[in-house]
Amino acid sequence: MKRLGFVGAGRMGLPMVRRLLAAGHEVCAVGRTPERRTALAGEGVRTADRAEDAVREADAALVCVFDDRQVRTVCLDGGLLDALPEGTALIVHTTVGPRTVQEIAERAEARGIAVLDAPVSGGPRDIVAGRLTVFAGGDEATVRRLRPVLAAYADPVLAVGPVGAGQSVKLVNNALFAAQLGLVSEATRLGRDLGVEESALLSALGHGSAASRALAGAASRGSTGRFITDVREFLDKDVAVVRQVADRLGVGLGALEPALAALDRAALDRAGSTTGT
């Protein structure tokens, strides 16, 4: 059993917390309001109103907030690293820019705190099933040390390189997924032009060589537009980070860019049609 501090027990974080508890770990999670702390306590979780208090006695801390800005606020601007005991570890599950997690690791190194760059692929259902994918960036010893914690909800845990590599793999993954979704939107437009009903087309393509997760997601909703609406909040922030990182490095997205532009157009079309109804 490990004592774990958890920051970000929300849509993704709460099912992680439940799996950690079921695996026998002790979890102290942040609840910003009395109502949230009461709800977490009802899950069997110790609670704190600040990140610093959640991690003060922890063997490891996990951060699963929404975006890069929130990670920097918690880990660099806030007191989490100072409160975390020396020699412990920090797992960053949020998708951020590679440089952000590298800065955290540099700051943590002075206190002997190991940082695992650990963005994820999958959703709440994958967490519940214990099959979330983790792209783990960190040295081999850190990955090995934290694998038993991650195993509560993740399989596979893929070691992909040093700190920052996990974020880079996740950003490429989501850029490719978004581009595929953009192509699916173009394919359904072509299908409509050819006189094929969208839900029938999506269902049929899933049995052919065009099958992909993007296509399966659209088929499960019977509409590419509905699937784009469902995933856009989370996907948009990651695509924005990909574009920022690529721009900073002076590299292009190549053939991914027009496919991402197709996704942007489909999202705008969907938003317009929804507003007009």
Image: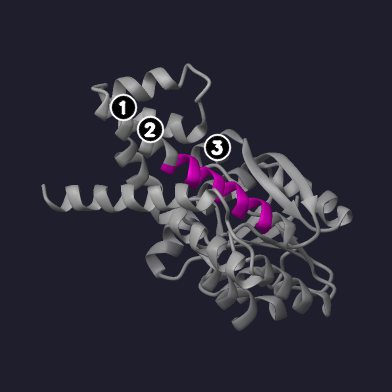
Residue depicted at x 75% and y 44%: 158
SS of the residue under disc 1: helix
78 horizontally vs 36: left or right = right
Residue beneath label 3, please? 126
The answer to whether marks 1 and 2 mark residues whose Cβ atoms lie closer than 8 Å is yes
Residue beneath label 2, please? 187
Residue 43 coordinates in the image, percent (x, y): 50, 50
Identify which residue, 165 or 75, lies in the foreground.
Answer: 165
Q: How crowded is mark 3: few (under 14 residues within 10 Å), some or many (20 or more)?
A: some
Q: Give the range drawn in magenta.
A: 167-182
- Point out the frontmost of discs 2 and 3: 2
Residue 79 appears in view: no
Q: Residue 159 carries which label?
A: none
Residue depicted at x 47% and y 16%: 207
Gap in angstroms between the C-alphas marked 2 and 3: 28 Å
Q: Which amino acid does label 3 sit on?
A: Asp
Residue 115 coordinates in the image, percent (x, y): 76, 65
Residue beneath label 1, please? 191
| Placement of 129 over or under 174, stated as above or below | above
Q: Which amino acid does label 2 sit on?
A: Ala
Residue depicted at x 27% and y 21%: 196
Residue depicted at x 30% and y 34%: 189
Q: Which amino acid does label 1 sit on?
A: Gly
| Quarter of the image where one finds residue 176 | top right
The magenta stretch spans residue 169: yes
The answer to whether marks 1 and 3 mark residues whose Cβ atoms lie closer than 8 Å is no
SS of the residue under disc 3: helix
- Give the mark, 1 or 3, whose residue is nearer the N terminus: 3
